[in-house]
């Protein structure tokens, strides 16, 4: 069959890899100038390695993406490390990334620390998530870990991640996070961009046509059979703007003329609401389901700095009731700064509603708020440490799940014959991430290729 894949992120490339090996004629459309999607990278002129626009790492238990790396000959680029992850409490970071750090945490009584450790051990061992999807994280943790543990550790994380929806998040979501979490973290030599490039080169060598800088405007059924996919040059600009780039970079260039081709199957690895904009013939009930899948956007600043912000901590979770951002991530406390010109590289990021004021604010306006908070993490911090900054924004970054969410997930096969959707809103109970992008991309490929 002739199959189109929309998106050259890890879901799209994994789907293309399986489909082209099965003998199908595969075309991948990607509006950005490089593969990788939200895991794609950028590079400063002084860096040897590119860096993800939005902070990324894997867990040692992320078998889907690590298995794909082995299949395509990228296993030797897998780096396994043990950085420190912590939460900011009472004016300083406290590591909470293992049994002993939890037992040392002074914010809750010792008995509750032990209780929390036992509950986490139970959740990591249990495979029963369905019994947890109709009870909120708040209610379940308060009952089994106690009020102190919930209020001091888990409530700040939930509020930071989901904001106003924190009280409706099902326990099945947290089960998935704890069940798969490992103390060892994984990164790729050359960054996630290196793996995305390798994967794109692999599917191209196998015979797929990977069209970078080509976005899809619309998908429509053809009376004689198949689906008509129309592409436009302006989609590249729209996608770049969504990732925080400057659309003026392409001003003055000749845009390609509208182009349309017919395919037997189409796999769209885009957000549900983006699919709704692409396809006019989706039935009202299905459109309502797509539009009813809430999500949050991401706003992330990357700082190239002459000094370290944190001595050892890689990942620092913040309490959004006290800080204007969710996480402070010192990437070079995870990966050697030698790959980044010897500088410290720090992410400061937040999940916010798609209509949040940050999407209308300039980089300087946002950083003015965030720099003041960085001084609470390190009182010595000075703006003169910052050589260069980048700001990236994505309106669709984090699905928001609710009680009984499994009943609301749309099937991968849409009501339009031959059209499939593979999005991060469909990987539940797992949270969004490149591991589950690979898994759902391959699942969609199996369905599309078998029909």
Image: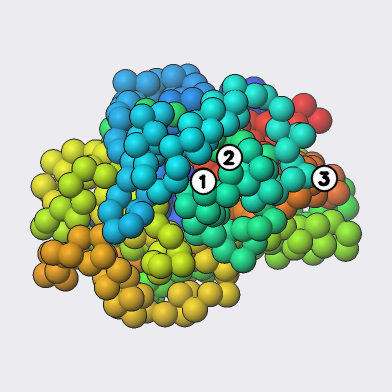
Which residue carries the number 3 mark?
A: 407
Nearest the eye: 122 or 246: 122
Q: Which mark is residue 149?
A: 1
Q: Earlier in the sequence, mark 3 or mark 2?
A: 2
Per the model, the C-alpha gap separating discs 1 and 3 is 30 Å
Instruction: Determine the residue positioned at 41% across, 29% down.
Output: 99
Q: Is residue 179 left or right of residue 327?
A: right
Categorize mark 1 by other alpha carbons within 10 Å: few (<14), some (14-19), many (20+).
many
Residue 349 horizontal/vertical position (percent): 39, 60
For the residues labelled 3 and 2, say whether their Cβ atoms are less than 8 Å apart.
no
Q: Are marks 1 and 2 in contact (CB under 8 Å)?
A: yes
Q: Residue at x 67, y 24 (%)?
A: 127
> Under tag 2, what secondary structure?
loop
Q: Mark 3 Cα within 10 Å, few/some/many (few <14, many 20+)? A: few
Under circle 1, the secondary element is helix
In depth, the one of 146 and 388 nearer the eye is 146
**Residue under numbered circle 2:** 145
């Amino acid at each position: 069959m002739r199959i189109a894949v929309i998106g050259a992120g890890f879901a799209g490339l994994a789907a293309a890899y399986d489909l082209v090996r099965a003998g199908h004629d595969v075309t991948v459309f990607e509006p950005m100038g490089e593969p990788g999607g939200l895991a794609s990278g950028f590079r400063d002129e002084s860096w040897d390695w590119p860096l993800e626009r939005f902070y990324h790492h894997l867990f040692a238990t992320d078998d889907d993406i690590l298995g794909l790396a082995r299949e395509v000959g990228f296993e030797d680029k897998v780096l396994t490390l043990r950085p420190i992850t912590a939460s900011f409490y009472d004016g300083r970071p406290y590591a909470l990334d293992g049994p002993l750090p939890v037992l040392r945490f002074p914010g809750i009584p010792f008995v509750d620390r032990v209780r929390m450790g036992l509950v986490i051990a139970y959740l990591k061992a249990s495979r029963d998530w369905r019994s947890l999807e109709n009870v909120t994280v708040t209610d379940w943790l308060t009952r089994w870990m106690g009020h102190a543990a919930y209020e001091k550790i888990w409530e700040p994380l939930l509020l930071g991640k989901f904001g106003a929806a924190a009280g409706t998040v099902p326990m099945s979501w947290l089960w998935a996070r704890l069940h798969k979490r490992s103390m060892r973290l994984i990164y790729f030599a050359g960054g996630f961009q290196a793996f995305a490039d390798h994967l794109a080169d692999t599917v191209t060598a196998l015979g797929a046509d990977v069209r970078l800088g080509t976005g899809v405007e619309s998908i429509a059924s053809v009376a004689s059979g198949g689906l008509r996919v129309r592409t436009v040059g302006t989609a590249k600009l729209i996608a770049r703007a969504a990732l925080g780039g400057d659309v003026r970079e392409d001003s003055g260039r000749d845009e390609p003329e509208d182009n349309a081709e017919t395919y037997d199957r189409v796999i769209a690895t885009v957000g549900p609401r983006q699919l709704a904009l692409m396809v006019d013939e989706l039935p009202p009930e299905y459109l309502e389901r797509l539009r009813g899948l809430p999500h949050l956007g991401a706003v992330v600043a990357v700082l190239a700095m002459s000094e370290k912000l944190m001595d050892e901590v890689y990942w620092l979770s913040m309490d959004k009731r006290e800080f204007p951002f969710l996480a402070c991530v010192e990437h070079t406390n995870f990966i050697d700064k030698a790959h980044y010109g010897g500088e410290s590289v720090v992410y400061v990021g937040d999940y916010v509603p798609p209509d949040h004021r940050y999407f209308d604010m300039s980089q300087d306006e946002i950083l003015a708020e965030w720099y003041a908070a960085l001084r609470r993490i390190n009182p010595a911090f000075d703006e003169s440490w910052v050589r260069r900054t980048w700001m990236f924004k994505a309106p669709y970054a984090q699905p928001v799940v609710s009680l009984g969410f499994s009943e609301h997930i749309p099937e991968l096969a849409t009501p339009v014959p031959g059209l499939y959707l593979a999005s991060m809103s469909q990987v539940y109970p797992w949270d969004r991430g490149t591991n589950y992008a690979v898994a759902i991309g391959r699942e969609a490929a199996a369905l599309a290729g078998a029909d």
